[in-house]
Amino acid sequence: MQPQTSLTSKALPLRPVTRLKPVRSRRRLYATVTATTPAAHRSGVHPAVVPIQRFPPTQPPSHKPPELRKSQLFRQYASLLRSTPIMLLFQHNNLKSTEWMSIRRELASALQKASASLPTPETAIPIDAIKVQTIQTGIFAAALKVVENYDPLATPAASPDPSAPSPPSSTTSTTPNTSPNPLDQTYTHLLSRTAHAAATSRKPTSALIPLLSGPLAIATIPTLSPHHLTTTLRILSPSPPLFPAPTRRSTPSYHDPSVQNGLQKLLLLGARIDGRVFDADGARWVASIDGGLDGLRAQLVHALQGMGAGLSGLLEGGGRSLYLALEARRGMLSEQAQVKGGDAPAGPAGGA
């Protein structure tokens, strides 16, 4: 008989216990966005985005870089030509800085005395406004061509490009400085390419162009005042007897060597007065008008009054002549009627 074995005597191999996790169902949830249709605009067109400025408002596109000194001189000369009614043109030959300083000092002193002697203080000009300065001849000639041949107000409006896409709204055409084309004719400043093309496409017509040669200087007077023009010519280009130089007793500093040596190197070439070009004799003729601008107005009024009196006298003379002729004819007819009445035969009553 075999012995019985207990279950505990023989160890059974242990197996690792696996814990089962509960299975969960994963469901992906997506957020749903509800699209809202915006309300229609009143005009039926959505407002467009504000157009981006292509160029800075203080620096529109130019034919040449505006930061150059030549461009700034060009703008300065063009402004002088447009705003200065009296401009004297001189040729200078190697004047020293001390000579320029002495000449400007004497001119300012003489102009101050001339302004103080005016009968009406309202017509006085600030002394600082009358200047004498040297110019760059080539740049001044280019500025003169633009001023004479280009009028920004007469420039036609630019026609739209048919190949260009239409703008989203009408704000692009009304907002300045948004066109990407530098050749757009809306840029009408003096340095624009439109002004350059208008100046170079025409022949120079100004009579001042032949005088623009060599080293030049200009004297500018901001108002049309023959009185100040006379004083300027007496200092810068004296010519007796109409424009004598100041005497040594009245102005001794005018006869200093620095002033006299500088004046010997100055030559008056011409003048540009109220848009018209005069030679040296014409400039002196304008300055020699008696009484200055007031005297010129008085002469104009006197001429108009003389023309009116002459016209009225001519009309009255014609009527008076006709009246005298008719009166003479009437007297002649009355005399003939009296003669015929006296020569008539007597009636039958007178014969009895």
Image (tube, rainbow, N blue to C red):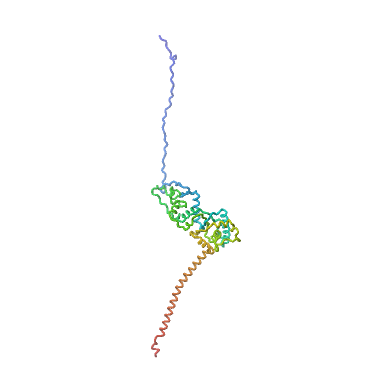
Which quadrant is the C terminus positioned in?
bottom left
Residue 246: x percent and y percent? 58, 61
User: How many labels sit on residues?
Assistant: 0
321, 82: nearer the viewer: 82
Residue 93: x percent and y percent? 53, 55
Q: State which quadrant residue 13 falls in.
A: top left
Q: Is residue 344 left or right of residue 105?
A: left
Residue at the extreme top of the image, as rendered: 1
223, 186: nearer the viewer: 223
Residue 211: x percent and y percent? 49, 57
Residue 84: x percent and y percent? 51, 57
352, 258: nearer the viewer: 258
Residue at the extreme bottom of the image, as rendered: 352
Which quadrant is the N terminus positioned in?
top left
